[in-house]
Image (cartoon, grey):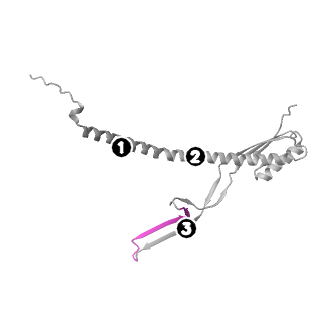
Amino acid sequence: MEKKEKKKITWKDFGVEKILLIAIAGIILLVTNFSERREREEPEKASEEQKTAAVSENEAYIESLENKLVHILEKVDGVGQVEVMITLEASRESVLNKDDTEELETETETSDGTKNERRNSRRENETVLSDETGESAPYVIKELEPAIAGVVIACEGADDNTVAAAVTGAAQVLFGISVNRIQVLKMEVHQ
């Protein structure tokens, strides 16, 4: 039996050209992997930013409504100091322009009545707006504000039934919600 000797491979055996080619190929792989990872992360960041913007937009809308309600109720005789909390059912909704609705219905029958074929098809086209860069967005007809789920009003004068009824009525008229979605509570007075 012959023993094979293990040959040690050195840098000189590869040659400078091969080492440079391997190094360049490694750098190219790293760069393409980095750019692909960045492309995948950018849409995730954009969707998170959109969610954050929608939440802050809802919070700003709620705060505006609460401030307006507090401002008006504090001017009502007997109400006193007021704090308000409003909750929403959903976020703002955009109504998009839809046009060119086509409905096509075709029927074919032969004279001997052997072949019956019926087809229905419907097609809707949306209007979109494009900018110079080629990015497009749907054409929004109107924005619907979010529906109010409930209102809680704490005021100093809530122990008076007349004041509580006036506060409830004001919230009902302003927000167009039923009485069962409005709660008026007596505020604790700290002296």
Disc 1, SS: helix
Q: Secondary structure at mark 2?
A: helix
Image quarter of residue 8: top left
Q: Residue furthest bottom?
A: 111
At 40% from the left edge and 75% from the top edge, which residue is drawn? 110
* View extreme (right): residue: 77
Q: Which residue is mark 1?
A: 28
Q: Position of residue 58 (x, y in %)?
A: 67, 47
Secondary structure mostly seen in the magenta stretch: strand
Residue at left offset 55%, top offset 68%: 100
In this image, 69 relative to 124: left or right? right
Q: Position of residue 50 (x, y in %)?
A: 58, 48
Would residue 66 appear left or right of 146 to someone viewing this image? right
Q: Nearer the viewer, residue 12 or 111?
A: 12
* Residue at image point 46% right, 44% down: 38
Indicate yes or no whether the magenta region holds residue 165: no
Q: Which residue is mark 3?
A: 101
The answer to whether one can see residue 132 in this image is: yes
**Mark 3 or mark 2, whichever is nearer to me:** 2
Say few, some or many: other residues with alpha carbon within 10 Å of mark 3 (under 14 / 14 to 19 / 20 or more): few
Q: Mark 1: which amino acid?
A: Ile
Furthest-left residue in view?
A: 1
